[in-house]
């Protein structure tokens, strides 16, 4: 079993145990279960936790061995429950442990297994749940029209194409539009029970079915243009088809003073918490860096942040101290020879970014936001990447939406792709979005540690 698999088992167990304990406490208010937990000694609770952890491991191992069929999932979970209950009975009969706690423990293990089975089945068959799959009618013409068809096909089942309606320009001899509200699109959309109509027109003049789209909108269907649909599916922006006026009239992009204040308060709390938790380990990390290669422990570099202001960013050094002595400012690459062996581990686990919590406390950075770039690269990116400067209207972050959705970038093309995610984050900013990014960052770190 890999390191990642073991950590995934532990993570799943903690989540499920916490959820099931809460469910039991809410569903059984008159039971003695809470009192029994308080009366149980540490050894009993430790053994109970170990049994549930073994159950979690057994569920996943058996399901991997048996395959991905629904029957194998049921069998795997059932066998794991039997193993857990037998362990409880053996421990109770041989050591006398779990006196008064035995029934509650059996209930907990059974509920845990049922919850895990339902969760995995929902993850596999979620497309059958009503309302989770959107039925789409595609209206339009041109190359972008074909791109939308491909986008729907690659949406992993979240969107299903039910009908395609091509709209060609209809003009008279004087170039005036002859198109009228035929309501054909509305009738076709109703026939296939569509809930979303996507309009993708390379040529709008004389081709845009205005009355039809109005009818669909007033009938309760979502009417989206290509840019909106691209954003909805990919959770990033379609920068090639966006104009400055789109930024002005699009919803979102509103991070007002109140939101900035709340975000700043949470940044301070989380940065202080992170420094307190990691403080005992920092001397050992510093010693390891010193023993690995000569040079300073902390790496300092000029970056560009909020409102194009430059600041000094702090990181644990992961490269040789003379990494840019001859090359000058260059992007780091995958398997970069300048990175030390310890530095590669620090980068994988994001430990090298712990000192950036100091940047958060000083106000130069936030916990979540676009990654700050070097001024030398920004001058080039502004010329080649449209709307690149717009990412500087928020504070840069230790982690961000681009960091959890896109691999490490080392070119102008990568910068463009990451900008799509950064601008999506700025457009749709919320505290809930920040917590989602933090949660995903933890998953990314665990995944990289297991490689």
Image (spheres, rainbow, N blue to C red):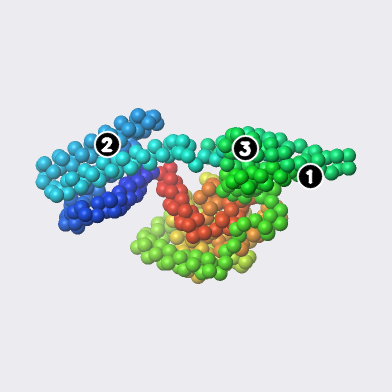
Q: Secondary structure at mark 2?
A: helix
Q: Quadrant of the C terminus?
A: top left
Residue found 57% across the figure and 64% down from its top: 255
**Residue 332: where, in percent of width, then height?**
56, 51
Which of marks 1 and 3 precedes in the sequence?
Answer: 3
Above or below: residue 305 compared with residue 69: below
Q: Are marks 3 and 1 in contact (CB under 8 Å)?
A: no
Judge depth for marks 3 and 1 and give the one in front.
3
Residue found 76% across the figure and 44% down from its top: 204
Which of marks 2 and 3 precedes in the sequence?
Answer: 2
Q: Are marks 2 and 1 in contact (CB under 8 Å)?
A: no
Q: Does residue 413 show up?
A: no
Q: Which residue is mark 2?
A: 80
Relative depth, front residue between 406 and 380 = 406
Q: Which mark is residue 189?
A: 3
Residue found 62% across the figure and 66% down from its top: 307
Q: Does residue 158 show up?
A: yes
Judge depth for marks 3 and 2 and give the one in front.
3
Q: Secondary structure at mark 3?
A: helix
Q: Are marks 3 and 2 in contact (CB under 8 Å)?
A: no
Q: Secondary structure at mark 1?
A: loop
**Residue 426: where, in percent of width, then height?**
58, 58
């Amino acid at each position: 079993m890999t390191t990642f698999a073991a950590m995934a088992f532990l993570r799943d167990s903690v989540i499920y145990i916490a959820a099931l304990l809460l469910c039991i406490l809410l569903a059984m208010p008159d039971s003695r279960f809470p009192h029994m937990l308080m009366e149980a000694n540490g050894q009993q609770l430790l053994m109970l936790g170990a049994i549930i952890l073994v159950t979690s491991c057994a569920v996943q191992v058996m399901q991997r061995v048996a395959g991905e069929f629904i029957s194998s999932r049921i069998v795997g979970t059932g066998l794991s429950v039997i193993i857990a209950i037998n362990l409880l009975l053996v421990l109770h009969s041989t050591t006398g442990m779990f006196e008064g706690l035995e029934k509650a423990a059996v209930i907990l293990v059974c509920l845990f297994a049922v919850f895990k089975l339902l969760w995995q089945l929902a993850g596999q068959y979620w497309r059958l749940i009503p309302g989770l799959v959107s039925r789409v009618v595609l209206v339009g013409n041109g190359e972008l029209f074909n791109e939308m068809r491909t986008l729907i096909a690659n949406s992993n089942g979240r969107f299903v194409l039910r009908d395609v309606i091509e709209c060609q320009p209809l003009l008279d001899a004087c170039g005036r539009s002859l198109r009228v509200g035929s309501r054909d699109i509305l009738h076709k959309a109703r026939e296939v029970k569509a809930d979303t109509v996507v309009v993708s027109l390379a040529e709008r003049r004389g081709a845009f079915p205005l009355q039809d789209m109005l009818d669909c909108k007033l009938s309760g269907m979502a009417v989206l243009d290509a840019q909106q649909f691209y954003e909805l599916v990919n959770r990033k922006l379609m920068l090639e088809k966006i104009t400055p006026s789109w930024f002005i009239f699009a919803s979102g992009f509103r991070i007002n003073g109140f939101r900035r204040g709340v975000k700043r308060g949470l940044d301070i709390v989380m940065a202080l918490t992170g420094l307190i938790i990691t403080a005992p380990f920092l001397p050992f990390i510093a010693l390891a860096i010193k023993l690995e290669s000569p040079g300073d422990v902390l790496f300092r570099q000029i970056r560009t942040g909020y409102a194009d202001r430059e600041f000094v960013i702090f990181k644990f050094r992961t490269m040789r101290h003379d990494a840019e002595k001859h090359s000058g400012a260059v992007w780091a690459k995958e398997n970069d020879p300048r990175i030390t062996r310890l530095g590669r581990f620090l980068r994988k686990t994001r430990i090298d970014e712990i000192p950036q919590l100091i940047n958060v406390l000083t106000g130069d950075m936030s916990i979540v936001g676009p990654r700050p770039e070097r001024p030398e690269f920004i001058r080039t990116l502004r010329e080649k990447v449209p709307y690149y400067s717009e990412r500087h209207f928020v504070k840069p972050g230790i982690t961000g939406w681009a960091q959890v959705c896109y691999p490490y970038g080392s070119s102008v093309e990568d910068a463009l792709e990451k900008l799509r995610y950064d601008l999506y984050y700025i457009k749709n900013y919320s505290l809930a979005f920040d917590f989602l990014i933090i949660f995903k960052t933890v998953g990314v770190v665990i995944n990289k540690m297991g490689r």
